[in-house]
């Protein structure tokens, strides 16, 4: 089976789910992190053979990670809003435990996931503006002048959802200006260690577009049908390449 893992409010993920269904990808499930963590029964095993899990879905079916062929991972953070604790210390402890469990469950699916979890994010690394700009320069993208302050930016609570002016999926690029070389966008995704990357551009007064940011959680809809066609191919190829 194939999965789209996302927050219930993620409209871009819902659009991708419907598009994949229309293209015949089945069985296909759209699940939220709330469902993964709120299962009435969860069995999570880590041993010398690897890691795997089984959990009961709301309709009574059992989801076994070994039966998953491919995953579009759009999980940005673990859901903590429902935690029924009266003290801040208890809530923080429970949140950390749930986040660790969710990361471990997602790691079980990492070999067949688009944007698997990593040390710095559940669907790819969170990066500051300066870090993304440095990677963009290494990739060969034009960037605006940098402004550096001695005051650190506060850490974001979750990765920002980029506009996705340009989408990169594997070696394929969607939305790049027709006059530009697409290879720098692919290089940026490789440097960021992401299968799927959204790159935001800024244009002003008829000047060439410059790099304005990037996100592992972009809006997918600007890619249209060509993006969905490629996403279908990408997902169905994941299980073939999994160990």
Image (cartoon, rainbow, N blue to C red):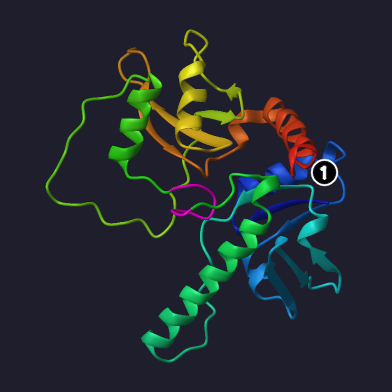
- Give above or below for 42 relative to 190: below
Is 109 positioned to the left or the right of 101 in the image?
Answer: right
Residues drawn in magenta: 119-125
Residue 5 x %, y %:
66, 55
Q: Secondary structure at mark 1?
A: helix
Residue 135 x %, y %:
36, 31
Q: Residue at x 51, y 61 (%)?
A: 77
Using the rendered image of the protein, determine whether residue 8 is visible from the camera's viewpoint: no
Q: Residue at x 54, y 74 (%)?
A: 98
Using the rendered image of the protein, determine whether residue 58 is visible from the camera's viewpoint: yes
Q: Is residue 151 magenta?
A: no
Is 13 positioned to the left or the right of 3 in the image?
Answer: left
- Give above or below for 221 relative to 40: above
Q: Residue furthest bottom?
A: 86
Q: Residue at x 41, y 79 (%)?
A: 92
Q: Residue furthest front?
A: 48
Image quadrant holding the C terminus, namely top right
Residue 167 x %, y %:
55, 30
According to the picture, the residue beneath numbered tag 1 turns out to be 21
Is 135 positioned to the left or the right of 30 in the image?
Answer: left
* Residue nearer the viewer, 148 or 116: 116
């Amino acid at each position: 089976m194939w999965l789209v893992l996302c927050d219930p409010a993620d409209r871009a993920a819902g659009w991708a789910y419907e598009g994949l269904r229309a293209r015949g990808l089945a069985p296909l499930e759209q699940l939220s992190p709330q469902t993964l963590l709120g299962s009435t029964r969860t069995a999570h095993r880590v041993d010398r053979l690897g890691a795997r899990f089984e959990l009961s879905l709301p309709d009574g079916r059992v989801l076994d990670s070994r039966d998953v062929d491919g995953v579009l991972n759009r999980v940005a953070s673990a859901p903590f809003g429902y935690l029924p604790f009266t003290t801040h210390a208890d809530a923080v402890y429970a949140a950390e435990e749930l986040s660790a469990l969710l990361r471990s469950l997602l790691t079980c699916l990492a070999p067949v996931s688009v944007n698997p979890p990593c040390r710095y994010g559940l669907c790819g690394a969170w990066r500051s503006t300066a870090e993304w700009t440095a990677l963009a320069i290494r990739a060969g993208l034009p960037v605006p002048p940098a402004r550096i302050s001695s005051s650190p930016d506060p850490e974001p609570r979750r990765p920002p959802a980029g506009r996705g002016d340009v989408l990169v999926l594997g070696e394929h690029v969607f939305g790049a200006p027709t006059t530009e070389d697409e290879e720098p966008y692919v290089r940026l995704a490789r440097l960021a260690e992401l299968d799927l990357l959204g790159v935001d551009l800024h244009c002003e007064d008829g000047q060439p577009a410059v790099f304005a940011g990037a996100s592992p959680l972009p809006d997918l809809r600007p890619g249209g049908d060509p993006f969905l066609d490629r996403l279908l191919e990408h997902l169905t190829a994941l299980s073939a390449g999994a160990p």
